Amino acid sequence: MIADPRVAAVTLTGSERAGIAVATAAGAALKKTVLELGGSDPFVVLADADLPAAADAAVRSRFGNGGQSCVAAKRFIVDERVADDFVDLLAARVAGLAVGDPALPRTQIGPLARADLRDALHRQVTASVARGAVLVAGGQPVPGAGCFYEPTVLDRVTPGMAAFAEETFGPVAAVVRARDDEHCVALANDTEYGLGAAVWGTAERALAVGRAIRSGALFVNAAVASDPRLPFGGIGRSGYGRELSAEGVREFTNVRTVVVA
């Protein structure tokens, strides 16, 4: 389909593997592409952050849609001076999440899309625990029909662990402890992805930290989200180009130069 001469450009929202395939086919046909792929978004909590507000947003950002969102927060990078309190707040909120049939109003966590995705998520959790991550909540597939996974919190995740280095596409929050603001930035940037980033703290300090993080979007004291009024997209292995807003329209517009003498 991409090779069809009637197709002028291609956009894809999907996996990294799919993005590579589409970009390869489009490149062979000299077609422009916009790719919105995976992410391992950092959710940074500084020492002066409003912890209850940050914990509330963390649950919404990580566990909404069962954690199956490219723009969901994945790595919770928390200043070690407030990490214990943040983990307690996060774990208490996660413990109250209802897992079950997504057609029921009370359900907050539905199933994963496929059994192999649940198995891959469980592998990431068990591999991280085997390397020293602390299992605070969840950590197991839910028995019975459906591809359900317990809402999970991992603490003391470090670079090199699967929960840090890979995209976790499901209800798993990986808490990473940082020494200070500079360490928060270094940890946030220790990834090949670059979709979104959220930083929590007093506005001036959080903005300074956020400006040093490589990402396509930065949200200060708010969870990353898409908005049709704002350009959306990433850098690195999260893709390229922008969707939404005027920038998204321009991606598929011929910027034509016309000179009349």
Image (cartoon, rainbow, N blue to C red):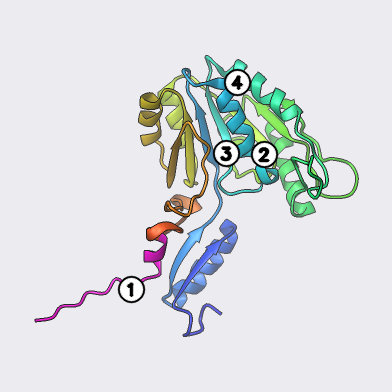
Residue density around tag 2, few if under 14, some if 14–19, many if 20 or more, within 10 Å = many
Marks 2 and 1, the one that precedes in the sequence: 2
Residue density around tag 1, few if under 14, some if 14–19, many if 20 or more, within 10 Å = few
Marks 3 and 2, the one that precedes in the sequence: 2
Residue nearest the observer in this picture, 164 or 58: 58
Q: Amino acid at mark 4?
A: Phe
Q: Which residue is mark 4?
A: 86
The correct choice, above or below, for 82 with respect to 165 in the image is above
Q: For residue 47, say whether it is visible.
A: yes
The correct choice, above or below, for 138 with respect to 51 in the image is below
Q: CA distance from mark 4 to mark 2?
A: 16 Å
Magenta highlight range:
248-261
Q: Amino acid at mark 1?
A: Asn
Q: Which residue is mark 1?
A: 254
Q: Is residue 147 left or right of residue 203?
A: right
Marks 3 and 4, the one that precedes in the sequence: 3
Q: Which residue is mark 2?
A: 63
Which type of secondary structure does the marked residue at label 4 adopt? helix
The correct choice, above or below, for 142 with respect to 253 in the image is above
Q: CA distance from mark 3 to mark 2?
A: 9 Å
Q: CA distance from mark 4 to mark 1?
A: 49 Å
Marks 4 and 1, the one that precedes in the sequence: 4
Which type of secondary structure does the marked residue at label 1 adopt? loop
Q: Is residue 118 left or right of residue 81?
A: right
Residue nearest the observer in this picture, 101 or 240: 101
Marks 4 and 2, the one that precedes in the sequence: 2
Q: CA distance from mark 2 to mark 1?
A: 40 Å
Q: Residue furthest top?
A: 81
Which type of secondary structure does the marked residue at label 2 adopt? helix
Q: Which residue is mark 3?
A: 73
